[in-house]
Image (tube, rainbow, N blue to C red):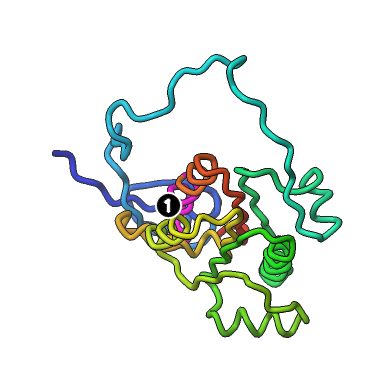
Amino acid sequence: MVKPRTVYSCRECGYKTYKWAGYCPSCKGDALVEEIALPAGKSSAPPGAGGDLTLLEEIPPLAEDRLLTGIGELDRVLGGGAVPGSVILVGGDPGIGKSTLLLQAALGFVSRGLPVIYVTGEESLAQLKMRATRLGLPARSLLVLADTEYSRIATRIAERQPRIVVIDSIQTVLKSELGTAPGSIIQIRDVTASLVQLAKSTEITLSAGRTPHA
């Protein structure tokens, strides 16, 4: 049985090495981050798992029922609203207003009668409520969850089956079984892939915030 090896990755450029260094030899960035490298060819998918072959002409057309946030400029950027099953990444520097925009969009969806789950990994529930109050946003029936463990988040989504899930932010969510720190390249890639698969299979619209280089 091949055991996982420790690998050191740069969170700036993705450079990897099996030896630790005080800085990245590639981009001269900050110290490398320790991660666990899965054995080559190792896959979490069971043998034979995957989609079936389908004739393109037999695929039913996607209904263009766009989901509106009520924020004119955001809906315009999204091509007239969010598409069911789509994944939207909101990126930007710290303090630029990602969390505020995500909260406003979530409450906009709720105001149109859409069930929404807002997952906060950076703020407590009390801080989230303070943000809404400070912005003068009405406390509508928005379901909120303060958690960072992917398995628990996925379980809550399966239980409530919302139309929209908002995650603030993607780099705070982790899978404990990977054995790496939140925000590491391995965590972000694996969590993102799982969330995309979840959104596509359930037609949930998923939006997440992310700070660059994190």
The residue segment tinted magenta is 183-193
Name the residue type under label 1: Ser
As drawn, 119 above or below 37: below
Q: Residue at x 64, y 52 (%)?
A: 89
| Quadrant (top left, top right, bottom left, bottom right) of the C terminus | bottom right
Which residue is disc 1 drawn over? 9
Residue 156: quadrant of the picture: bottom left
Image x and y of residue 108, in percent: 74, 64
Residue 143: quadrant of the picture: bottom right
Image x and y of residue 24, in percent: 48, 54
| Quadrant (top left, top right, bottom left, bottom right) of the N terminus | top left
Which sits in the foreground, 115 or 145? 115
Q: Secondary structure at mark 1?
A: strand
Image x and y of residue 4, in percent: 24, 46
Give the main secondary structure, helix, strand or loop, of the magenta stretch.
Answer: helix
Label 1 crowd bin: few (<14), some (14–19), many (20+), radius 10 Å: many
Q: Is residue 97 left or right of residue 47?
A: right
Which sits in the foreground, 130 or 141? 141
Q: Residue at x 70, y 35 (%)?
A: 63
* Residue at the farthest left position: 1
Q: Residue at x 48, y 53 (%)?
A: 188
Which sits in the foreground, 100 or 156? 156
Q: Is residue 74 left or right of residue 82?
A: right
Image x and y of residue 6, in percent: 29, 51
* Number of numbered tags placed on the structure image: 1
As drawn, 56 above or below 20: above
Q: Residue at x 46, y 61 (%)?
A: 173
Q: Is residue 189 magenta?
A: yes
